[in-house]
Image (tube, helix red, strand yellow):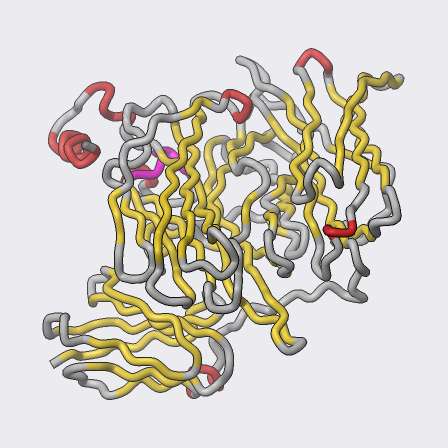
Amino acid sequence: MKKILLLCLLALPCGHLLLASHLRCGYIIAERSNCTSRTVKIKIVVFTNTASDVKFGEDGILYFGDGTSIVVPRVENTPRPDLGANIGMASYTVNHLYGSLDSYLISYVEPNRNGGVLNMEDSFWTTFYTETRINLAIGTCSSPVFLSPPVFFSALQGSEFKISLGTASHDDNLITYEMAVPYRDRGLPVVGYTQPGGMSVNNLTGVLTWNIENQTQAGEYTFAVIAKQWAKVDDQYRLIGFSRIDFQVILNSNASEIPMLDDNQELDEYSRILVQPTEEKKIKVFYEVDSDRNPILEMFSELDNESVSFTTYDSAAPTGDIKVGVLTITPQEADVRENAYLITVRGRLNGGPSSPASVSDINYVIYTDEIPEFPFIVDPVTATEREIAEIEVFPNPVQEQVNIEVNRPGESEALLYTAQGVFVKTKTFELTTSLILTDLPSGVYICEIRRNNIIVKRIKIIKD
């Protein structure tokens, strides 16, 4: 068990057990058996350090968001040499029957993250955490599903690279993206997190761009992106769910500059393309690289094989070899919907002793009905004086239950912690709710109110 390993590490040197730190990043997918069912298939996907003796599971806890949880069993790694040295993948799937059609925050926490991450404190001793929210009340079929693996390698100084964290929506919903802070538990950011300059994510395509500064230190960096799912209700977009993904970028001082992808398209900043069912759209993608490093072009698509195909061939140019990809998009009548589909084209160089693996991505946002005049991008709710004043938490002190009122429409979440920061319970609601405290000992608690996954009020509660 991992607990034994950790105690051994605390007590004395244990040789190979010092490799116990193992989880690099991951995410959760929640998918209903049908779009009206209360049964949800939950899949946890993690990427691991295969140099570690510790495996995924055993001490990891999956919280279903309805007050129940399970311990995830041990799962062996599947090596992923295509992603780099000492990188593996593991997953665990379980079906869960919910008692009612409601909104649920599903989360997973496990010790430990892999050691040596540069942009947080003590990653070796930091728990890994990820979460996703699915709303069963409005017919959501699944949470956002990430299309491509989240572990990447890069050149070091003065380079720029683009990587996709884009998702598929099995529902006709809008997906937007924003940078986030990695968590170590529910609502608890990792300690000492810093985000390097020059990093941004396109909030419609999910492509992350990092202009790496010359002084950036080589090593491992961990970040997080939240994919938010929006449904149109009465001509207004409403946040109905989200998925949080941790991912890593590993900078290597021996890497050369990353070859970038190019194509024969002139697109706007959101890479939007309209292709209706009566049409065929061909896109050529060019990847000029050193053929000795076995360049690969590959595609990840939300559309199925009947609606999109991808072929590659090798060409030549005065400056070097060119790998060419031909993306052919032919939507079917069944593909027509209001919101877009996402297609990722990835150029990948396999690594070696002196040339680490690297990737470069392009995303295309494919509409099959019409392109909106302007992409709908939701500004996250921020804590303003007006919003804080509109939230009431009473009574305080409290004996049996604390009441919460949010005097504006939309989904809110109340989270309760002990004074030491240990998560106790949560409830999702609109306008009003109550948290029952009769099962808790007397003492000081912290109540946190969130909207759109942003903290808008935090208050100390005294339970008599």
Q: Image quadrant of residue 423? A: bottom left
The image shows residue 322 at horizontal and vertical percentages of 81, 21
Q: Where is 456 relative to 17, above or below?
A: below
Q: Image quadrant of residue 350? A: top right
Q: Residue at x 30, y 39 (%)?
A: 112
Say if the magenta span includes residue 360.
Answer: no
Question: What is the quadrant of the N terminus in the image?
Answer: top left
The image shows residue 412 at horizontal and vertical percentages of 43, 74
Q: Which residues are magenta?
A: 112-118
Q: Residue at x 21, y 81 (%)?
A: 401
Q: Residue at x 64, y 75 (%)?
A: 236
Residue nearer the viewer, 228 or 29: 29
Horizontally, is 423 left or right of 320 in the view?
left
Residue 301 visible, this angle: yes
The image shows residue 283 at horizontal and vertical percentages of 83, 37
The image shows residue 142 at horizontal and vertical percentages of 51, 54
Count the marks: how many? 0
Q: Where is 270 relative to 78, above or below?
A: below
Question: What is the quadrant of the C terminus in the image?
Answer: bottom left
What secondary structure prevails in the magenta region?
loop
Q: Residue at x 71, y 40 (%)?
A: 362
